[in-house]
Every structure is written in C-alpha cells, then in structure tokens.
Image (tube, rainbow, N blue to C red):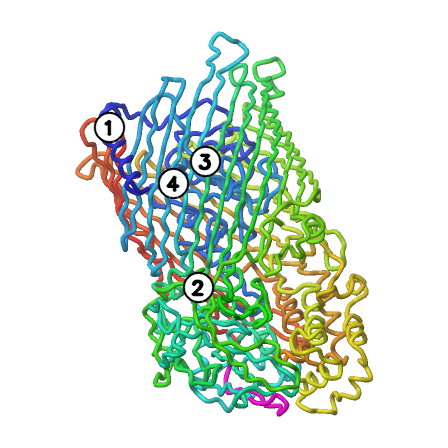
Amino acid sequence: MNKRTAFVAAGIAIATSPYLLGQDDEGDTVYELSPFTVGATENEGYRATTTLAGSRLKTDLRDVGSAISVLTKEVFEDTGATDAETVLSYALNTEVSGVHGNFANTTPANDGRVNTANARENAQGAQRVRGLAEAQLTRGFFLTDIPFDSYNTTSVTINRGPNSLLFGVGTPGGVIDNAVKSASTSRDFGSLSVRFGERGSHRESFDYNKVLIDGRLGLRVAGLNEKIEYQQRPAFEEDQRLFAAINATLFKNENSDFLDTTNLRANYEKGEIDGTPPNIIPMGDAVSDWFAEPTNVSQIAEIANWEGRGITPPGYLGNFTPKYTVDNRLGNLNSGALYSSVGPNEIPYFINIPYIYTDASSATPSVGLADPSIAGVQARVRWGVGAAQNVPDGQGNSELFATENFLGKNRVAVLAPGFAYPVIQDRNVYDNTRLLLSGNASYRAQDFEAYNVALEQTFFNNKAGIEIAFDNQSYENTSRLAFSDSQHTDLRIDISETLSNGQPNPNVGRAFIQNQGGNQTQNRLTERDAINVTAFYKLDFTESPVSWLGEHTLTGFYGTQTIDRTNRGYTHAFVDIGDTDIASAMNAKVHQFRRQIYTQVYLTDQLFGANSPVDLNITDYFRGQTPQPGDVVKVHYNEWNPIFGTDTDRLLTDEFQVERFLRSGGRSRQEIDSEVVSMQSRFFGGNLVGLIGFRSDEQTSTPQITIDDYEALTGVAGYRFDNGEFDEGALILADSGDVEKGDTVTWSLVGHIPENWLKLPGDSRLSVHYNESENFSATGIRRDFNGNILGSPSGTTTEYGGTLETLGGKLSIRLNFYETNNDLATVADPGFGFPSWVSGGMSRYKDDELGLIASGLTPEEALRTSLQRSVNFRPEILDIDSLMTEFPTWDALYDSLLNLLPETQRSRWLGFNAAGDPEWEANPGQSVTQSFVSEGIELDVVGSLTENWTVALNVGKQETVTSNTAPVSQVFVKTVFDNIKGSTFEHLIDSPVQNEAETFLGRWGRQQFNTMNALVGRDGQVSQEQRKYRVNMMTNYTFGDGRFSGFGVGGALRWQDKVATGYEIVVDDDGVVIPQLDKPFMGDDELNGDFWLSYNKKIGNDIDWKVQLNIRNLIGDKDYIPVITNPDGSVAIVRNPNPEEIFLTNTFSF
C-alpha cells in the first residue's frame, strides 16, 4: 500500500468510526491550567488573548510590552492559508517570498544578476520582518528548520524585533513561532478535511484526539497529504506528514498541599516534502540585443561617465549587424587575430564539454549532426594555446559563442556600474507565470523528523513550577536548481557558425538555456538537540498588609542546545571507459572546473527569419534531465597540453561516461548555553505591569578539522583523494572551537489606565507600553581584512505606544512606534575578498612557469605573449625590453605583484607550495560588515464587532536604511586599485597563455573595485523592495438565524505602498557609484484581495460539515511587478504577480 492510499484509508477509518460518532462536541479544550502552554481555546476568532512570547510563561497579551502578533487557527481556516508562504503576507510588517508572497527577496550580485536559489531552496526562511532581517523560526520556542503547516498548528506567533527573554542569540528580525497541537485528556474529537484546487491540486488532512484514560491520558494524531500543481508548469510540491501528541497526568497528587499534578507532554512528527520549486523571477534577457542595437547606450554612456573614466565604447556600437553570427575559427595566434566583435556576446562555457539537447523534449543528448559517424557527439574543443601554435585547418582556437545582453557580466561593472542585468519581461518571448523553462530538472526534497518531551510540575496551586523539556530535530534538504546560477539564468541565442570540429553548426541562430556544472546537487543536514529548564515562583503581597508591594513572578531559565550541520556538494564529471586518460586530456580532476558538465537545451527553431524577440514564442519547457550517472556519450576533445611551439592535429573522439562525485563538504557544530532571570511585577491591582530580564549566552562554534590536521591524521591532502573526489571522512570536527559570550537585557512597562480615571465609551480601556530589548548573533570569531577581531552582530529595539480595548474587551486596537538597529551584520556574499583575486593572477603566471597550461615557459616567453595580447603591439605603452628589465626572473615578477598589496596583507604571504599553488597565512572568519536602522509605526486591530463578525486590520510603516558598509575592506580594495594604476600591471594581461584578455587592472577593477563600489553605494538607501506602508485587513461574518443560517462570507485585502525600485546615480572618474537618494524610481502600489464563502450544516447528531470556497487573489494586477529599476529609468528585474487560485474545502468534524 503506498503512502497516499494508507493516508486516505486512515482518514476514512477515523471519519466513519461508530465510536467516534458518539462523542460530544464541546470545543477544543486542551490543558487549561498549565502556565507553560497556551491552548487554542484561549483565542477568540482572530484575536489571541495569551502568549508565551513575552516571558516564556503564559501571559495576557495586554500585559506584554514587546511587539507580538498571533495568527490564530481561524486566520488559517478563513483565508485557506497553510504555511509561511501563504499566511505571512497577511501579517503586520512582515514580508515573505514565493508564489503567494509580497516581495522577491533578492539583491543583484556583482555581475548585475539576481539569484533566487536561496529562496527556492529554503522557502520557510525567505521572509523579512520590519524590512530588516529574517525572523528566526521556532517550534514551541525551540529553534527549527522544519516548515510549519496548519494541519498540526494551533497558532503562529510573530515577535517583531529582538527579545532576549526568548533568544539572546538570534536575528534582529525577531521570532516566528509555530505552536503545535496538544492532546486533550477530557474528550474525544476529530476532523477530516479534503481540498480540491486548480490544475489537479489537492489536500487531505485528518486530526483525531482520543482519551485513553479519562482525565489522565490523551492521544492526538494528525496527518497530511498534499500536492500543489503550480500555475508555473511543471512546478509542483508534494507534502506528506504524520504527527502524534500525548498528554499525560502522571500523578494527580490530590492529597498533597505542596504538589500539584505532575504532567508529561510529548509530540512527534515525521514528514517529507518533494517537488520542483517555482521561480518567480524570469530568465535573463540575452536575446533582445541580438535583434537590434540597444537604444539606451548613449544614456548609459552619460550616466556611467565613459568620457571621464576613459572608457572605450565596444566596437560594434554604431556598426551593429542585426541577428549577427560569429566566425569562430581562429588561426595562428601570432597573427594577432581576434574574433570579430559584432554584438554583445559571451563564451557560455570556458573550457567544458556540454551535454546538448536539440529540443525541449529530447531524451538523448546530441549536437544534431546528420553524419551517423558522429551522431550524438558532444562537440566542444578548446585548443591549448602557445606562442607559435597552429592547429588543424588554421583553427588556432574554436570558441563557441552565444548572445548576451549589453549589460553582460563582463561589461556591467565597467560600462555600466550600478546597473542590473535585465530579465525577459515580454510574455510573447515566454510567460514566466506559466512556464518554468528548466522543467523538472530542478528539484528540492526535504525530510524531517522531530520529537519533543516536556515534564511539568507545579506547586502550591500554580504558585511555583518547573518544566524540563527535551527537543530533538533532524532536517535534511537536498536540492538541485538547474539553469539558475549567474549567467546560466539567461535565455540566449547560439551565434557560432561552426562547431569546434570545423563542421557547420546546425544550431546557429537558435535560442537555448544552459546549466552550469559545479555542485549540481546540494545536501544539507541539520541535527538539533536541546534541553530547556524553566522554573518560576509567584510572590503575591496583594492579600497582605503591604498589598502595595504587588504581585511578582520570578522566572529562571536554563537552556543548552547543540546544532550539528553537515553539507555536501555533488557534481557530475566525465570519466574514461576506454584507453583515454581524461584527467590528462582535460588537465583536470573530477572536482575541477574543466571537468564540470554543462547542459544546453535548444528551445526554438533558427530565428534568422524572426523580426523581434516576440517571435520566439516559447511555449514548452525542458522535459529531459540533466546528466545522470551511467550515461555514456561521444565526445570530441583534444590533448590539453600540446608541446609548446609545435603544431598538433590531435582532434579526437571517444566515449566518456558520466559519474557522480562528492565535490565539496563541510561540517560545523554550535553549542549554546543560555541563562535567563526575569521578573514580571504587577502593581495597583494589575494596572502597572513591569518586566525585566537579564540573559547570558555562551556559544562554542567548532569548525571542520583543518586541511593540515586532516592530512597529518590520514595522509589525504586537501581533503581529497588523488582523483579529486572529496573524502567523506573529512567531515569531522576540529578538536576545539571559538567561544563567544554575550549579555543582553530586556525590560518593559505596561500601564492600564483605571476605568474610574478615564471614562471611555463602548466599555473601553486604555493602556500604554514601553519596551527595550536586545540580542546578538553568535557567528563565530570574525575578523576584518586587517585581521582585527570584530564584535558580534547585535540587535536592539525600542518600542512605545498604546492599546485601546473596546466593546467589553472584544476588540483590541494597538499602536506601536519602534526603532530597531542591526549593527555589524555580516554581508553574506560581498563579491570581493582577499586573497582570492590576488592569488589568481599569480597562479596563472605560475601555471605557465610550471608548464601546467603549455610546456614550461620562460619569463620572456610569457611576457611576450602577454604583451602582444595586452596592447596590440603598442610599444609606446609597453615593450618587451622594458618588461624584461623590470621582471628578469619569475621571482621578480611575483615580488612586484606582492608589492601592490598593503603591508598588512602582504605579510601573510607564505610562498608557493609544491604544486605551485599560492599559500597565505589564514585570516579565519574574514568578513565584510554593514549596519541597518529600521524605524516605523505599527497599528494592529483585531477582535469581534459582534458575536458573528470577526475583523482584523494591521497597518505598518517602515523605513530601513543601510549604513557603514565595508569600512575596512573598502580601503584595502581601493588601495590595491590605486597601486595597480600607473604601474606596469595596469596594461599587462594577467593570464598570458590562457585565452583571456583581462589586464590586472581590468580584472581587479571589474571584480573587486567596482563590486565594492556597488555595495558601498547602497549606503543610505532603504532596503531592497521595502514598501513604506502596508495595510492588511480581513473579516468574516457568519449568519446565525434566518434564511442564510449556516452561511458565512468573508474576504481579505492586502495593500502595499509604492516602492523605490532604484535611484539615479552619479559615477565619478574612478568608477565610484553615488546614488542620488532624492531621485528614486518608484514602482506602483499593489492591491490583492481574497474572497471566501462557507456553509455549515449538521449531519445527524454528531457530525458538523463545513464546505468553503476560497478565491485567493480575486483582486490583483496580473502584470509583472517591478523589483529593480536601472539608473536610466528602465525596469531591469521583475517578479511574477500573485496568481488567482480557486479551491474548495470540505471539513467533517465530530
């Protein structure tokens, strides 16, 4: 029996059980008196009345000073939301990415492109609170990676901003907590729910509680089976889970004046989520500039200050040939010949052999040649380069070319700093809302298991108590996001006239997508173990002669948790199955770049007859699969390292096999010990409530064993076997780790104005609040580029405001003003670093010296080749005699390169190792930092206007600004840039024999200096995609009597303000980008609206039937939503609008 059949059978069995149908229906009462839990029955419609988020003990929300919102089960039921993606967009000052989200959660990388991989791999983490940072996800206030779902959720609590009483180690975004269901010991009840959606989507869930011993032992089980077929074909998700909870009163202690009941609670969940995640960002546009020269070039030239920066325009500008192709046969390199630059183009793979599929439905890779002797051959030959080398038919090198946007990765940083690479926005090319071009080549699989056990003992009728809770979680995420990395997110056109074997290219003029090699599959395993001990004691003076001393609850908390993370990256590589030594032929081991297998899929016919991009009209996605272990294909190749200075005609064909290898791995462990002491005090009959808490955290971060230590232990160098495969055995921890400590404080005051002080209409009461809190992120020891230890990232928040409770407490209106700071935050991927790019130039020259690229060269041979390719024989700039005078030996060249560095970095140089690789003294934890400040206002209205009418309204104002970015590293990057300028290296190629034309200054400027400038240039800007105002509202009305008795109707609106999608810029003569913050480009506001209609009916005496029709996004624009606008005013990046979804849900409760 498969899982789905078993699931449905279990649900039907529960639904039809005669015993169950005999139980009464008295509401979901679960464990009312525990100070350590909050039950679902303590919520009233959309309004929650109690929370654990204030102090870890059950507290009335009206007595809490921090910013807390609760999404009750009624919110989930009415809106049809089930998870983070579908529910968080209704929450106050909260953003979430995804198909149903309200922001894209992406920032351009240093090549101008955006990458959605993180959001697609970790959907539950793709959220942001107050425009500042993602909130930590917790499960019963234990940290978690497991995505929550409504099938076993009673409520979701959002604590916005730091709260050290919950977590001293965390993000300033706050906490999003999932409260799972508990078992009842007082009654039996259950439900079965079946939902049918569009495109075959369906969802089945059951929930059943059984009292095993009346008042002593209850068992609750729940299950979920769901399949979502997204509008973007063929993206889908399958989610299957089982959940169980028990609640036991071990000892009633009825005869004890000291002990109250002794209770045990436990829950367990196991699940798996599989599917192809949708991509809300269209593919990059590398096709439009093939049909016509970009119309905004002159504007870009003016904005990017080409004249002041001495930029030479590309040669094809003003001499553009539409639908151009490239004669990619290049003769003797000594001739100085270059490929004709007829339009924006890019070499889509550096030196790799690609898998080629001639159309979207191809099952077998093939270039598409008719010749049966080479049918199916994967043709890609990059000839080794030497100063006097010829190859067959005068073909000195045979690159394969494809189109690229004018703002391509090798141009955007130089020609257009501050610009983003545009995506396809014309749905006549292809419609990203309905088509995922990569098909099911991408996937994400999540497997998880969790259990939690809590033992609780209270004393003196709940005046004191202790809870000891154990939590264990295992979460594994395996993903392969094909066609979704950097330039491999583009739709391109093949413009190579010939294949690398000299034959005509049958695919020239056809559009294609491409997947890179690298870590094609990522596996991330996180295992968590935690123990929490919470104890409290209530000291009550209210009945004593000193009643003015009030009532106080002293709480102590101790927690210890261990988080083990293991990451593995797998790659596919060709291996030889015959006489060929592929490692020698390609000069690469299985983990290295040259052995990575690319995949190229053609999606159109030849487009020479097309008039514009709209004629592409792509309507199908890739239905094949990327290379799989065991595949055998024919491959053209040549011997990588021909003898320097001689000719070769070694064009070869052989069969290679695809195999999967472990390419990379990592292991780390965090151990966090926390101690908290807090006191909540109530004075003047509870009209003044104060809270203060002190927290101390100590984190030990243990990294993976070092390369040197592992080699000493095992003899395996660099974690790798001789063939380059990563050694699984290296996934062990070092003997010790770095220790960080942090102390944080939280305090708040809440004042309830006595009713006899302030008479308000509507049976209303007014309260005021003030709150300060902080936390820090234990990131391990971090250092700046100079080796100085950085402080831990920290968050602080200050909040104040008031609450009006009216209609006898049924409606709550809370107004909150806040300022939240995030200091010394780590920039996740700054795009520049040390010593990576410094080592690069040295490595390329060292390869020439050692003969790793061509037979070993002398300095003169390498410099002569570099000279010819650097300045096109312009001796007034450089000549070989002056070069040999300055660099008579290899060591002289390397010393001069090192002298470009500041002394602090230069002093770390250790020399070349035996393999010729540069080695540097480590600067562990090297980081780039920045800070943020978020200020805003929050209005939260929730409750009931009448017994049958529930309402919720929240209004958020937020403005988050970046500051103090890269204060140390930007000085380093600029210093090296200035040192290269004016030196010999300004015009010298940094890879003389490799077929690249990048000078030392050009590469450093493009990949380091311009990237750093773009990052620093964001200082003063609001967070990407931040809307200043957001308004969410929802309501539901249930008809009690009359002709519409049993019916319910409701709806929701979600409005987002206009958004600054970009700014005008000024670029100075050094290429520094200065955004003009008073000249933003604004995107439109957004309005989305939902509608639902329900009907309740009693079936017999024991079953309640509810049927509900939901139309999500009944109101909403269907156009792409601008995310990033370039400085010339053109929209570059867009995201998909929320799709309209219709679904029908039947729920049977008993």
- Residue carrying label 3: 179
**Number of marks present in the image shown:** 4
Quadrant of res 1103: top left
Task: Give the Cα distance between marks 4 and 1.
Answer: 22 Å
Quadrant of res 945: top left
Which span is picked out in magenta?
A: 331-344
First-in-chain label (2 vs 1): 1
Q: Amino acid at mark 1?
A: Ser
- Residue carrying label 2: 627
Q: Amino acid at mark 3?
A: Ala
Q: Position of residue 1047 (x, y in %)?
A: 23, 40
Instruction: Describe residue 666's horizontal placement relative to residue 614 as left or right.
Output: right
- Residue carrying label 1: 17
Q: Position of residue 280 (x, y in %)?
A: 42, 61
- Residue carrying label 4: 241
Seen in the picture, residue 935 relative to 759 is either above or below; the reply is below
First-in-chain label (4 vs 2): 4
Residue in the image at 34% along x and 25% along y: 210
* Mark 4 crowdedness (10 Å alpha carbons): few <14, some 14-19, many ≥20: many
